[in-house]
Image (tube, rainbow, N blue to C red):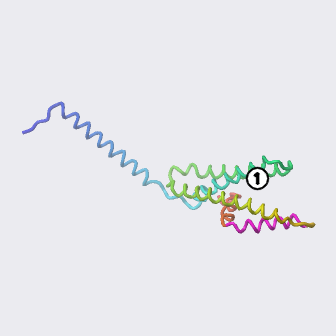
Amino acid sequence: MTTLSVDTAPSLDLGMLRALCALVLLLLACSAQAQRQPPSSTEIRSAYCITVLTGRARDAQTLASLPAPRALQERHREVQEGYEQDVRRLRSYLVPRMQHLDGEPLLAAADRGQSDVNAFLRAQLACKSRCDAKPASGPDAGEKNAACFSACSAEDPASDRVKACSPVNWL
C-alpha cells in the first residue's frame, strides 16, 4: 500500500487548483466569444461610413487650407464640420454596441470604406483634371463644367457607396 506524504499532498492540490483555474478561464473566454452577436447591416454600414466620412473630412480640411477665395475656404470648412458631425453621430451609435458584436465584419467594413474613399478621392482628382483641361465657355460655363464633373464622377464604382454615407439620415 502506497501512502502520500504530507509534503506531496499540497503540491498535488495546488496543481489541480491551477488546472481548474485554467479550465475556468478558458470556459469564460469561450463563453464571452460565443456571446458576441453578428453586427446588423446598420452597424456594418456605420463602421464603413465612419471611415469614409473621416477621409472626406480630412480631404475637406486639406482643401480649406489651400490658397483660395475666403468664401471657398469657408465652404470647405463647413463641409468638413458636417462630415465630422456625422462621424460623431455614427460613433455615438456604434461604440457602445461594439463590446457585444463580432468585430471582424466591422473591421472588414472599415477597411472597405478606407479603400473606397481613397479610390473616390483619386477619381475626383482625375475628373477635376479632365474637366479643367476642357473648360466650357459662355454664359452657362459653370453649369457645363459641373455637368462634366458629375458625369465623370458617376463613372467611379465607389462613388455611389461613398456618397450614400452622407447625410446620415438612415440612422
Q: Is residue 82 placed above or below 127 in the rendered structure?
A: above
Q: Is residue 144 magenta?
A: yes
Check disc 1 and give the amino acid type.
Val
Locate the C terminus and report the quarter of the image it occupies.
bottom right
Picture quarter with the N terminus: top left
Vertically, is 68 above or below 146? above
Relative height, residue 130 to residue 10 (above, below): below
Circle 1: element type: helix
Q: Position of residue 17 (x, y in %)?
A: 28, 39
Residue under the point 59% across and 59% down: 112
Rendered view: 168 above or below 19: below
Magenta-tinted stretch = 140-156
The residue at the far right in this view is: 139
Image x and y of residue 144, in percent: 85, 67
Question: Residue at 18% across / 34% down in the picture?
Answer: 8
Q: Position of residue 105 (x, y in %)?
A: 53, 58
Q: Nearer the viewer, residue 122 or 84?
A: 122
Q: Residues within 10 Å of mark 1 (few under 14, many from 20)?
A: some
Query: Residue at coordinates 66% horizontally, 60% vertically from top-left?
Result: 119
Q: Which residue is mark 1?
A: 79
